[in-house]
Amino acid sequence: MRMARIDQLMLMGPVILTGILNSLDKSSTLESDAVVRETKVFAYQAIGLLALRMPQLFREKIDMPVRLFDALKMEAQYLRLAIQEATSSLALAYKDAPATVLKSLEALLFRNSQVHCPSRYICMLAASDSRLDIREMALEGLFPGEDYRKSGSRGLNLKYPKLADMLDFILGQQPFMFDTTGSGDGKLLLESTTFVAMIKFLLKCFEADAKENDMVEDTEFLDSVNKLCLLLEHAMSYEGSIQLHADASKAFITVATSFPQVIASRYSAKVTWLKQLLGHMDSGTRESVARLLGIASSVLPMSESSALISELVFTICGRLKFRFEMQHGFLCALGYITANCILRTPTVSFRINYLHGFCGSDWKHLIHSACSCNIFHFIL
């Protein structure tokens, strides 16, 4: 088909397509059958080639898109790539389709993209495409109707995949992303813009799941929360963009709002890693990390929390001068950690008095920025 003349395809194209569809309909479902596997892969590749060479075979109706979307849901994993490539080729065939067909196709795309994990993952990857139109279509696929909501329109009943399903699919594609050997110190496996879209979408899945049921006692959902945390930790890699770090650190707080004890327990063991992020160039990231450190400190023994406060105080007030970002991050962390300690016991108040002696120096403008941490109003 790739080398055939167009006049030959005009005659044989419909016959070839009918034969391909018949072979798919009558094929065995046994994945162990090597002949069946190769035949199915060839069939979907042939559909893609026909869509490129003879788009008129498809553009008058949406039977083939329906078949391919169903195949993405039902066929075995080894066929997914061939089906996805055929679907991409088929999209070009509808460029000049009638308006009624395009409307039906739009409804089909909206219906299938809502809960279909492979489609959403493809959109996440396409969010970092070099072509603007591809990026815009990808974001529309992930977050349909956002522009309409901004203009006041309503009526879209948006549905999202289960968080567990979406994370499991991502895990299948990028298993090293969930490596537990390190936190944010490895190579970023995907483009930052892909991660930004991925995190935003996963948070929507998380919020949708949390609204439907009480997930606090759901062990399966708690496992998904831990997987989400692993993904966010990977997103904090030094190779990530400032926007990615800001979104990932803010996502930690979003999750912690619903599962404070889970997040506190997890990150009480990662205090050293969190302290390294307090000097981040982005103020929003610094404040989110400081807040996360405060949440983690709530489950530390009082002696460890007190030692952490002492370390921050003596670092801030020592002779060694740090850059502004580090000073700000340390002060924010000090505010959140001390606030948590005061809720548990008042014995930490002497630390505040120690810092109060520096209010008349260059620290005052930095201490002011820590007021939002709900503790320094006691000393100002």
Image (cartoon, grey):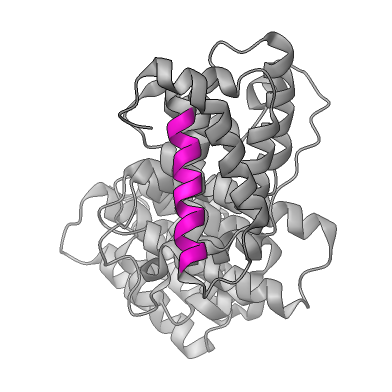
Quadrant for the N terminus, please.
Answer: top left
Q: Residue at x 76, y 76 (%)?
A: 218
Residue 199: give x, y in percent of width and height. Answer: 51, 50
In this view of the protein, which residue sits in the foreground, 31 or 317?
31
Instruction: Give 352 or 117, whichever is nearer the viewer.
Output: 117
Of residue 115 and residue 183, the one placed in the foreground of this image is: 115
Can residue 348 be seen at all in this image of the molecule?
Answer: no
- The residue lying furthest to the left in this view is 320
Question: Quick check: 46 above or below 162?
Answer: above
Measuring from the top left, give residue 85's x and y in whole percent.
Answer: 45, 41
Say which residue appears at 65% left-offset and 27% top-offset. Answer: 146
Query: Which quarter of the figure has residue 150?
Result: top right
**64 left or right of 365 in image:** right
Q: In the image, 10: left or right of 279?
A: right
- Marks counted in the figure total 0
**x and y percentages locating residue 62 in the rendered image:** 69, 28
Residue at (33, 61) in percent of width and height: 277
* 141 sits to left or right of 308: right
**Residue 113 falls inside the magenta stretch:** no
* Residue 305 placement (x, y as % from top left): 47, 81
Magenta span covers which residues? 35-50
Above or below, comparing residue 31 to residue 156 in the picture: below
Res 110 quadrant in image: top right
Left/right of residue 325 with respect to residue 309 in the rendered view:
left
- Is residue 199 visible to us here? yes
Q: Quadrant of residue 186?
A: bottom left
Q: Which SS type dominates the magenta stretch?
A: helix
Asked if 311 appears above or below 49 in the picture, the reply is below
